[in-house]
Amino acid sequence: MPSSSGAEEDDQVREARAYNYSIYLMVSMPYLSLGALGFLIYRGLRKKAAAERLRRKAEQPDSEGGLSCSPPSIAVIS
């Protein structure tokens, strides 16, 4: 009656662990992909909203009727 060696049992444990890791990876991959895509969309929408706010602020007239741009500053050297 042949007895199984310790190396064979060790290989079976490593194979089972490898199958478990591959299953975890396959199950988690759709969630990771969806999360990354959602983050990219969120970040893009935030950048677009910030650019729109800046554009509106630049176009908004001030109380004197002109655009709200400040005049260039002049440095005086003495």
Image (cartoon, rainbow, N blue to C red):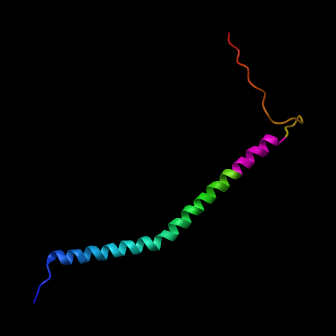
Q: Residue at x 52, y 69 (%)?
A: 31
Is 14 placed above or below 55 here? below
Q: Is residue 63 left or right of residue 29?
A: right
- The furthest residue to the left: 1
Q: Quadrant of the C terminus?
A: top right
The stretch of residues the image draws in magenta is 49-60
Q: Quadrant of residue 18?
A: bottom left
Picture layout, residue 70 above or below residue 24: above
Q: Residue at x 23, y 75 (%)?
A: 11
Residue 47 in percent (x, y) is at 66, 51
Q: Quadrant of the N terminus?
A: bottom left
The secondary structure that most of the magenta stretch takes on is helix
Q: Is residue 56 magenta?
A: yes
Q: Which residue occupies the extreme bottom position in the image?
A: 1
Q: How many marks?
A: 0
Q: Is residue 53 left or right of residue 64?
A: left
For image coordinates 53% across by 66% down, the residue present is 33
**Residue at the limit of the structure toward the top, as seen here:** 78
Please provide percent x and percent y for residue 20. Answer: 36, 75
* Quadrant in the rendering for residue 26: bottom left
Residue 16: % across, % down: 30, 77
Residue found at the far front of this picture: 2
